[in-house]
Image (cartoon, rainbow, N blue to C red):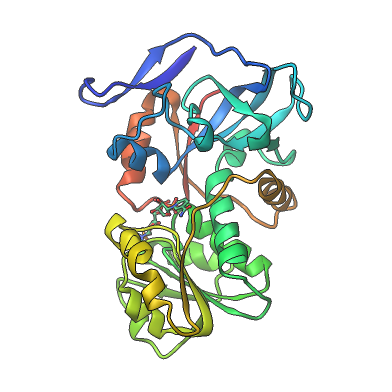
Amino acid sequence: MKAIVYNKKAYPDKLVYSDIEKPVPNDNEVLVKIMAVAVNAADYRSMKMGIIPKKKIFGADIAGRVESVGINIQQFKPGDEVIGEIADYGFGGFAEYALAPERLLVHKPAKISFETAAALPMAALTALQALRDKGNIQKGQKVLIIGSGGGVGTFAIQLAKYFGATVTAVCSTKNVEQTKDLGADFVIDYTKENFTKSDSTYDIILAVNGSYPLLACKRILKPKGNYVMIGGALSQIFKAILFGWVISFGSKKIKFLTAKPKQKDLEFIAMLANDGKINPVIDKYYPLAKTAEAMQYLAEGHATGKVVIKVG
Ligand SMILES: NC(=O)c1ccc[n+]([C@@H]2O[C@H](COP(=O)([O-])OP(=O)(O)OC[C@H]3O[C@@H](n4cnc5c(N)ncnc54)[C@H](OP(=O)(O)O)[C@@H]3O)[C@@H](O)[C@H]2O)c1
């Protein structure tokens, strides 16, 4: 099969379009014929940090058709259309076929294409778990989403609206119209306005992207509010992990999310997507052979929604 294999000595890209053996599922694995796979920060960040998957193939967010299943697989059969987030299982999505345990897969929403469905797993799960589990989102609350223009942010806007919140979203000028279209009640263009200096306060702040000082964000958090750090610059993430508990004294909490690929949550996301309650925003498509280019584009940090590789 064709796959994008990491080779640290390869030049100019370390991600090489290669021919390798098609994998064979063991008793507890599902073999998925990949139709589309989305690129995530987890791919390029792991590569940059030298955390290379055992099989040297990145790619977490898969959408495809079940090719064959191991003897212990109960939830899926050949021909089923599935999506999944397989970072937890050693990645492997940038390929024509990938292996996954059934706990990481769910049925693809029937009404949307493979290319659209591939955009869902990691970004939408992250937005869901940040708002619901860490943010404890409640109807009528005020939510601030910092970095609303990218993969996680575009889902966070739609999910916060789904949960009945009033959403203020922070993005650059080029994403303002899209952010309004996705349902944000208020949009702050960070190139023109510093939201940390405003008088507005929020029940939940999702720090998806962009590094804004923790104390400045805490100031605009309501008492009993939750600041949820999702991503951004690594230095800022480390600060939140190291000092978040100190800054959390009092009723305003600073929390860090580590999203988990829970099957129940992905089923919920798939249901919302099938019902049109959340719609993936896709910035660009690439063919599998151009995955290195796609990774480079995403790593520049200004994608508008998701970047998807068409494989099938
Ligand atoms: N904690 C977890 O479990 C978890 C899970 C998944 C992802 N993450 C992390 O979450 C982050 C976001 O992921 P993603 O998939 O959404 O990334 P992405 O798609 O690459 O997001 C890029 C977006 O960030 C926005 N941005 C850049 N600089 C900004 C600034 N100064 N202020 C506000 N927005 C800014 C850009 O919008 P503009 O073009 O408008 O600037 C762009 O749309 C990454 O750091 C990723 O590693 C964490």
Q: Quadrant of residue 66?
A: top right
Residue 75 appears in the figure: yes
State left or right for residue 66 relative to residue 14. Answer: right
In this view of the protein, which residue sits in the foreground, 309 or 256?
256
Q: Residue at x 75, y 52 (%)?
A: 275
Q: Residue furthest bottom?
A: 199
- Give the percent coordinates (x, y) of residue 209: 38, 61
Task: Give the residue at x 67% y 50%.
Answer: 265
- Picture quadrant of ligand 1: bottom left
- Horizontally, residue 270 falls left or right of residue 145, namely right
Quadrant holding the C terminus: top right
**Residue at 44% over, 19% down:** 3
Q: Closest to the observer: 304 or 118?
A: 118
Q: Position of residue 200 (x, y in %)?
A: 45, 87
Towards the viewer: 173 or 117: 117
Look at the picture and state if 116 lies above or below 230: above
